[in-house]
Image (cartoon, helix red, strand yellow):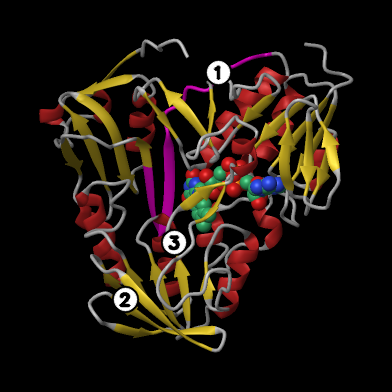
């Protein structure tokens, strides 16, 4: 398509939005490109907010996804601190919070998500105590870091990645850390019991008071701060700050009103196209059918955001290249690199390769002979092999998988996926 007089308007200046802008230009989008976001800063890396940045090992410039000059070179106009409120599909305009509106020829929605709020007795909806934190943005991370002094009593609610990474960073800064997890193990949504048990041991050895099967009942607020958290079993935990890592809610309200999103996200195809031919979407806010797993998925990860953004950019630029990658993710805690490829839900058996006590092992999730997913702890070579194999339907020699004398690549056998029509 000839695009020289067309306007591509991208809403959401995070991982997906930044990548989509540059990718559309590289693929041949000739017209105007605007990248509009509601945060004040240039697009930045979100993962370090709970890791190296929180631990004080990276400065603000080190967080930027790209320097300002990269947007200038790609002729991308940046509009910061601007919030989209509504989409008028019939007239191809968006309404902004300041009362103005902007026209588009193509619209890209890259609005990500926001933290799920803590709800319990003692909290008044809409009035957040000054020491209750969530973690999604740089502003959130700055708020946590300002209160994370040595000896501070930090209570973390939620044993998912964000909660565990904040716990590790806080211990590194000398804080006293208690972590509460409602389920009977940490990482219950994403990893098998063996991997959960390993991370629980590591956190406890680092001095974290980790309590699974524990639910928050209420908070005691004194003035504008939480003084203590009370658990369902009656335990009262005095705190200096609380960080709630309870997962995220997708930012799709405007897209829902416009009729292109469901509660769980914006459905897109392998080129990141929505059901409106003038609108694409990428990143955490999308739902995409995955031919490897035969179901619609919403993936919260940087690689997924980048790959969907590139697929959208390729289509907008007239060189369509569908996104069919295997989902993958990483997490850094206490110098341990956890890398996960595939999705383990519904697995029948978990086979370990290597000994968790050596702090280097891999967990393979199989269903019959089919490999569904793998988690690697300090084993990048295993991860790379398995990730490549998982990009197709992968069977595995389950009986020999634990035998480290047999090279992993001899045990993995891949066959192409027959992709159903979308
Ligand atoms: C603390 C933390 C650690 C993480 N660690 C990892 C990790 O180790 N590995 C990994 O793969 N992933 C990690 N993630 C997840 C990863 O950051 C997300 O998957 C990724 O940021 C998704 O990119 P996105 O562009 O879809 O959304 P985002 O990066 O959230 O960007 C969306 C942007 O849109 C803006 N926006 C929303 N609504 C509007 C609107 N109406 N108008 C204007 N702007 C709007 C938002 O403010 C935001 O700036 C982590 C996330 C967090 C919070």
Can you see residue 275?
yes
- Is residue 329 shown above or below 199? above
Q: Please name whichever residue, 254 or 300, is drawn nearer the observer in this view of the structure.
A: 254
Q: What residue is shown with label 1? A: 322
* Discs 1, 3 touching: Cβ within 8 Å: no
- What kind of element bears circle 3? loop
Left or right of 206 in this view: 166: right
Q: Which mark is residue 207?
A: 2
Residue 413 found in image quarter: top left
- What kind of element bears circle 2? loop
- Is residue 32 shown above or below 149? above
**Real-space Cα distance between discs 3 and 2?**
19 Å
Left or right of 332 in this view: 346: left
Q: Which mark is residue 245?
A: 3
Residue 157 found in image quarter: bottom left
Q: Is residue 151 magenta?
A: no
């Amino acid at each position: 398509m000839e695009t020289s007089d067309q306007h591509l308007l991208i809403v959401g200046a995070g991982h997906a939005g930044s990548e989509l802008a540059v990718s559309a230009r590289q693929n041949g989008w000739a017209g105007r490109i605007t990248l509009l976001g509601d945060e004040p800063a240039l697009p930045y890396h979100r993962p370090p907010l709970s890791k190296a940045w929180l631990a004080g090992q990276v400065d603000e410039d080190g967080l930027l996804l790209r320097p300002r000059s990269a947007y200038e070179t790609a002729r991308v106009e940046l509009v910061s601190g601007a919030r989209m409120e509504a989409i008028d599909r019939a007239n191809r305009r968006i309404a902004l919070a300041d009362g103005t509106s902007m026209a588009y020829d193509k619209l890209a929605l890259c609005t990500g998500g926001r933290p799920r709020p803590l709800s319990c007795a003692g909290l008044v909806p809409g009035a957040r105590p000054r020491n209750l934190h969530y973690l999604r943005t740089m502003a959130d991370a700055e708020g946590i870091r300002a209160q994370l002094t040595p000896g501070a009593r930090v209570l973390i609610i939620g044993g998912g990645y964000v909660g565990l990474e904040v716990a590790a960073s806080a211990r590194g800064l000398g804080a006293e850390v208690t972590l509460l997890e409602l389920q009977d193990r940490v990482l219950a949504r994403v990893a098998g019991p063996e991997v959960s048990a390993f991370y629980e041991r590591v956190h406890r050895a680092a001095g974290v008071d980790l309590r699974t099967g524990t639910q928050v009942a209420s908070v005691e607020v004194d003035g504008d701060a939480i003084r203590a958290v009370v658990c369902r079993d009656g335990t009262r935990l005095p705190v200096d700050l609380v960080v709630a890592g309870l997962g995220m809610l997708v930012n799709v309200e405007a897209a829902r009103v416009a009729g292109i999103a469901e509660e769980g996200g914006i459905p897109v195809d392998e080129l990141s196209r929505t059901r409106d031919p003038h609108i694409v979407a990428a990143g955490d806010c999308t739902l995409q059918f995955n031919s490897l797993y035969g179901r619609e998925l919403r993936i919260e990860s940087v690689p997924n955001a980048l790959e969907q953004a590139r697929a959208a950019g390729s289509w907008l630029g007239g060189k369509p290249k569908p996104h069919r990658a295997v989902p993958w993710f990483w997490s850094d805690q206490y110098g341990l690199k956890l890398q996960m490829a595939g999705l383990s839900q519904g697995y029948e058996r978990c086979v370990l390769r290597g000994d968790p006590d050596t702090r280097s092992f891999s967990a393979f999730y199989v269903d019959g002979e089919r490999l569904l997913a793998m988690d690697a702890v300090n084993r990048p070579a295993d991860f790379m092999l398995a990730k490549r194999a998982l990009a197709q339907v992968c069977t595995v020699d389950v009986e020999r998988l634990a035998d480290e004398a047999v090279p992993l690549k001899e045990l993995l056998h891949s066959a192409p996926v027959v992709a159903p029509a979308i």
